[in-house]
Image (tube, helix red, strand yellow):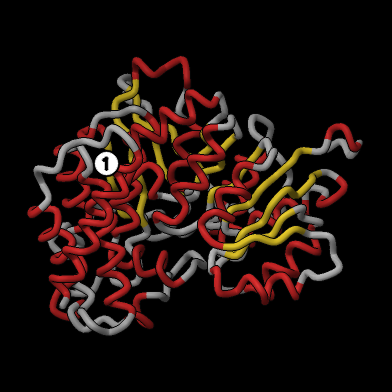
Amino acid sequence: MATGAASKRRLTILGSTGSIGRSTLDVVARLGGRDAFEMVALTGNGNVALLASQAVAFGAELAVTADETQYSELKQALAGTGIAVAAGRSGLVEAAERDAGWVMAAIVGNAGLAPTLAAAGRGADIALANKECLVSAGPLFVDAVRRGGGRLLPVDSEHNAIFQVLEGDQRHALERIILTASGGPFRTWPLAEMKGVTADTARAHPNWSMGLKISIDSASMFNKALEMIEARHLFSVAPEQIEVIVHPQSVVHSMVAYSDGSVLAQLGSPDMRTAIGYALTYPQRCSLPVERLDFTKLARLDFEAPDEARFPALRLARVAMQRGGVQGTVLNGAKEVALEAFIAGRIGFLDMAEITEAVMERLAAVPAASAMDDVFAADDEARRLAARLIG
């Protein structure tokens, strides 16, 4: 990669202290670091010390903590460095609005909506790792990217895999998209045993190293439910064209089936840096030190249908897609409240889906969103209702 000052790409990472953000910085460092890139802004939430060290190491122009109460701590940590400091929701939007051509959207939850929309609106290429942008505001977000003129580059391993093998000139022959799921730590557990699952048990993913909430979403397969809704908006497919299949080894990251019977798959070791690197250097490929597949050592690749009785989140995703409107917003908002309650030990593992479904049923008639305020209103109502049901 060229290192001349004029050729440096300007980057912003929204959510740099999370697992995706840290992996992104690792990829940036391996592809030349400050010699090849200019870091415009980094944002984080609770880990101010890590955020400050990242900002210094990569020469960021701006560092933002989402937690306004930590503004003074971050400012003190970066005193004398020349790095600007901001905090809160307005600070996140400020980071997104700064002139970076490529923005990693890795803030977890609806907190990532406003800054990612701001980046899309000014025409930045969006490396999308935030599920809620498409789950909660799919049509509005896709339209914002289109109007801004940037590119939408999926970073989730499954969507990135589809992005790699979906042939642009063969959309007429697209039959179905097949999302693979590891099945998580409870893939073979009987339903009765899943009732007693704790947050500590649920966070132990067999293949991927992820944050607490994402790991629990994976264990409940809510992450796959959200990915189904994302895929509909990312690739403009009908709900019935989206299939989920359990693949415990996480080697086949997803597949695309065509009308001639061909199925194209993207394979690789379970390392998020592959998808991040592809999004960062697209349409070129870069060189990364990820583990290479040795097919002679792959004992087997297993595939099985998901059990929606034990993982009802998948069924709820199909309901949300069929209903349309703001049902994705409602599903996600209710799920987030239920997830927090589960982590706090206030509800059981299986209660998360029951509460989410109850909220979806009560808000089934809410009309489609015509503006982001409608999305936020539906999200607020879903969260309030979920909180009342939890008690």
**Is 44 positioned to the left or the right of 183 in the image?**
right
Q: Can I make out residue 296 in this image?
A: no
All told, the count of numbered labels is 1
Q: Which residue is mark 1?
A: 243
User: Neighbour class for label 1 at 10 Å: few (<14), some, many (≥20)?
Assistant: some
Identity of the amino acid at label 1? Answer: Glu
Quadrant including the C terminus: bottom left
Q: What's the residue at 57%, 58% (across, down)?
A: 15
Quadrant including the N terminus: top right
Position of residue 248 measured from the top left corner of the image (x, y, whole percent) = 37, 60
**Is 35 positioned to the left or the right of 240 in the image?**
right
Q: What's the residue at 75%, 49% (across, down)?
A: 39
Q: What's the residue at 60%, 65% (across, down)?
A: 65
The answer to which image quadrant residue 337 occupies is bottom left
Position of residue 238 measured from the top left corner of the image (x, y, whole percent) = 24, 29
Q: What's the residue at 59%, 62% (across, down)?
A: 87
Q: Is residue 172 above or below residue 310?
A: above
Q: Is residue 216 above or below residue 129?
A: below
